[in-house]
Image (cartoon, rainbow, N blue to C red):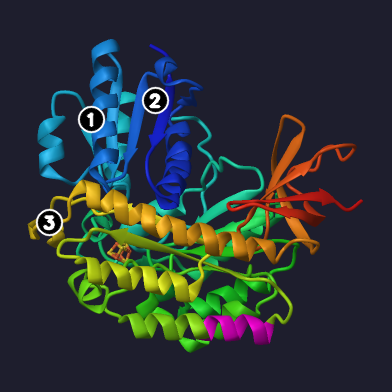
Amino acid sequence: MSNKYYIKTFGCAMNFSDSERLSTLLENYQLKSAQKIERASLVIFNTCGIRQMAEDRVYGQIHNLRKNYPNIKIILTGCLSHRPDVQFRLKNKVDLFYKISDKNKIKNWLNKNYPKAQNPKSRTKVSHQENIAYLSVAPKYTDKHQAFVPIMTGCNNFCAYCVVPYARGREVSRSAEEILMEIKNLIQKNYKDIILLGQNVNSYCGTFKGKRIDFATLLQMINNLSGNFWINFISSHPKDMSDKLIKTFTSLEKVCEHIHLPIQAGDNKTLKRMNRKYTRMHYLKLIKKIKIGFEKNKPGKIFSITTDIIVGFPGETKEQFRKSAEVMHRVKYDMVYFGQFSPRPGTTAWNMKDNVSKQEKVRREKYLNEILKKSSYANNKKYVDKIIDILIEKEKNGFYYGKTRTAKNVKLLIGKNKNLIGNFIKTKITKANIWNLEGEIIS
Ligand code: SF4
């Protein structure tokens, strides 16, 4: 049997980042990465439990894999791995269920099934906290220019619809020393886009030289590192967005002019049922402060605001839904990630009556998407004729594709400008579309 592994990652950037760390761990057991799932002897499903559809895809793929390759070893981790009903359903198909933070469980299993490498890959300093120790494994980064750096994991908020606090446990933050060491290493390797990750980065509460520090201080410390790189971060909870943090991220030179601030719903009663712990007014005041902050601290620079909205949360009336539409008109988002409510076992909303029909959820999402198209296009038009920095990410069929500091995708003709992937390039924006920009490289 081949000693090859394949990781199938579902869901968010945090899962993606966890898989990068898991790769290193597996390679410490003489396992090599397989290009295709069918070439692997060990397949790991790093799962997402946010919607039933994502869950069903995992069941389907595991079923087919087991049927076609009866001798393959299958591990299931991520957001579904803790659920007794999932473990029961897949008990004859999966060899190991483990929580991503349970490094000992996977190591014990690997010790029994695979030989250890002579020279295991280097690690950063080990954290004292058991449930965050897995983040101390040096990841095998998938991209060469953009890196996800988790600064914390877990969540204390228990939003009614969300599985994360059950799947990942309570919030734990990495020390600033460990984060800075990882980022310095990335800068040396010429990484240009550092994306700080956490379920709620705003409540980061790590230490530096034994003293507690908050997220604003951490951002300041990363900004002070020498090198030419961008800093981005996801995700922020509105209830933990302090004035100090707004002042910090709207003014630091390396922090990009983009904020993702999930609102989830524009109606106070819906927000309360969701257990979001802020009101629509509080959220709108934050947006105002952020806009003022960018205008004052980075005058003349375009900034962007994105969010998440759930449609059809249990009990959401048409009138309450209209409040989400109203917020969208007011904020004029650059992007909104919509989710049609899907009840998740174990969450508070699981016991609520899912009384908005599928058809109505589709209609509501479509309605909001039309508002988004208008605001996104109007915002994109502000870029035309401007000269801005683009990070070139890939090339295809004679074009480069890159992104702006405001997380806009840009398409550029390659022409004579070869080998620019991973570089910041001055670009003149020539055309605005609804979802992206087009431009030409200024040589
Ligand atoms: S803040 Fe809410 S939505 Fe975000 S991870 Fe925590 S519980 Fe889930």
Q: Which residues are magenta?
A: 289-297
Count of numbered labels shown in the rendering: 3
Q: Amino acid at mark 2?
A: Pro
Give yes or no for residue 296 being in the magenta stretch: yes
Q: Amino acid at mark 1?
A: Tyr
Mark nearer the N terminus (1 vs 2): 1
Residue occupied by mark 1: 59
Label 2 CA crowd tier, 10 Å (few <14, some 14–19, many 20+): few
Q: Please provide percent x and percent y for residue 60.
A: 25, 26
Residue placed at 39% from the left, 76% from the top? 238
Would you say 144 lies left or right of 158 here? right
Q: Please provide percent x and percent y for residue 268.
A: 25, 78
Is residue 375 in view? yes
Q: Please provide percent x and percent y for residue 53.
A: 27, 39
Residue occupied by mark 2: 115
Q: Amino acid at mark 3?
A: Asn
Label 3 CA crowd tier, 10 Å (few <14, some 14–19, many 20+): few
- The answer to which of 54 and 319 lies nearer the viewer is 319
> Quick one: SS at disc 1?
helix
